[in-house]
Image (cartoon, helix red, strand yellow):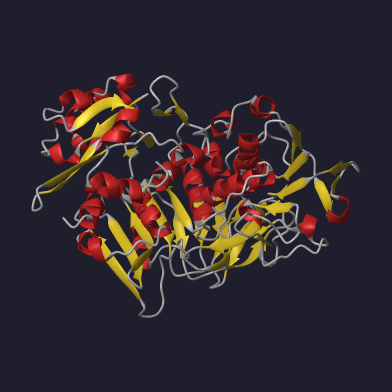
Amino acid sequence: MQKIFIEYEKCLGCGLCELACSFEKEGLFNPTLSRISVTRLYLSGLYIPLVCQQCTKPLCAEVCPVNAISRNGQTGAMIFNVDRCLGCQMCRMACPISAPIWDEVRGVVSNCDLCDGEPKCVQACAVGALQYIDEAEANILREGPIAEKLAELTKIL
Amino acid sequence: MRHVIVGNSAAGISAIEAIREYDKNSEVVIISDEAYQAYSRVFLPKYIAGEARFNDILMRGYTFYNDIGAKALLGQTVTEVIPKNNQVCLLSGEKISYDNLLIATGASPFLPKIPGIDKQGVKGFRTFEDACQIANFMKETDSIVIIGGGLVSLKAAEALSKGGVDVTVVVSSGNILSQRLDSVGASIIQKSMESKGIKLFLNCDVKVIKGYRSVQGVELTFGKSIECGIVIVAKGLRPNIGLVANTGMEIITGIKADCYQRTNIPNIFAAGDVAECYDLIEEKESLNQMWPNAVVQGRVAGANMAGGHVKSDGGIALNSGSFFGINIASVGKTKTKGNSYREVTTVSEDGNYRKIVIHEGRIVGTLLVGDISGIGMLHSLICQKKEVADFLTFLEMGQISFGHVLASLIGR
């Protein structure tokens, strides 16, 4: 199983990932519709992309009252079935990194589905901050203060 | 080994799934007085509004019980629990023995002692049956009064107003959702309700429900009369503890359950709206009758029934949802008294309201109205009782992305 691995120190905050995602998923270049989002701290020169971690124990799926969230056996991505979603947003409440996004127009929640194994955000990243690599490898490579804090704050991942 | 579960909603279903993670072979029996397969009460308003069919609000697929190997006795009422015999009695007279029992009977609408509350057309709004009856009544009336200003009341008001009937909401408090929202947060929703044509009476009660056998109207405390064909009573819930009343089980308002969801009777567990459990913010037992708590409690109960040793960190008050097109989410303490609490409140240019409550340097509650996108992270930080000193500046600026918190915590 592969996952999106983030090397935070490499990110320059260009936002191509957000544009690639929103275009792939919504047909629009609109970062607010992107499943990946970059927090930009210009004064610290720090750019932090955040995207669904496809948790091993997904709290979003556990709480969903209509069983609209399930794992894709091939990619390991948590798939949000927008046809079943009724917009209660309990999944957003449950996610410690606030990954699922709200589609105001349709009144449903959507989330990163790893683009069926070919994540467009990774393809768009020019500096290699985003990589789509084997999960085991990602766990070994994961280092640095941001990654450590993230793991500490989200013990469930 | 036989696990018996009384109650077929969030807690009961989560318990079955947890039991099966530990124990593939034991017998599991789930009993409910509702004749339907498990559905999500939270979406009954959508059913009434015609926005969802029953199929759309099912918790699991049609073959769930069969697939997971549970025997479902639906439409059967448990009348009594006899702990000394390890048995439950059904209304039919049948007795079922158990090794472990989970009480997940939920709660029922509280009906206050208003004259006329027993008239036909006065309904709580809790079950699928209730929803069907309300939908039927709606065909014969063009005016509805809803008593109460909580979540159930508002969701009902929203759903029914879409059906083209006149909706009046009568609220005792000075604002809607008074248990969770302050007046600023509430006014955002109230304005939107009124713009959709819903009439809102605050600071008043229904004095009497009028009519012969059926409801014809209500009279409010300040004398005004409103004609209506249905009165929906949404004044909170009372735990369904009737079937354990004479068992020596420890009851507060609900059944007292510890962090393993055990009651004081060794092989009986309790979970969901019927259970009163430790609240990690209030730091005492509390009724947190909300879906996510029921799911967590059900999972913990199921795991421990099946021989696991899983401890819950405690429950927390929390709500999320959209009302009249505006999202609201709240976690933990949202209303405070005394100066040991600090409230950080921001209102953005586009009208998004955010409140974060801080106590002894830790974040203990939050209320978001409009854009609720940081709610999951805040929920997690509240449950972890995280110190806020490092990221307080960001909170004060209304910045609540996880990235900001991460950056602050690593000293950037």
**Residue found at the far right of this picture:** B93
Image spot of residue B315 (x, y percent): 52, 57
Image spot of residue B278 (x, y percent): 56, 63
Viewer-side residue, B226 vs A69: A69
* Point 67% across, 58% down: residue: B239
- In this rendering, position of residue A119 left or right of residue B100: left
The mark total stands at 0
The quarter of the image holding the N terminus of chain B is top right
Image spot of residue B196 (x, y percent): 39, 49
- Please tell me whether residue A75 is drawn above or below residue A6 in the rendered image: above
* Point 76% across, 62% down: residue: B249
Whether residue B191 is visible, yes or no, is no
Viewer-side residue, A1 vs B285: A1
* Point 52% across, 48% down: residue: B292
The quarter of the image holding the C terminus of chain B is bottom left
Viewer-side residue, B266 vs A125: B266
Quadrant of the rendered image containing residue B206:
bottom right
Whether residue B266 is visible, yes or no, is yes
Quadrant of the rendered image containing residue B97:
top right
**Residue found at the far front of this picture:** A140
Image spot of residue B130 (x, y percent): 65, 45
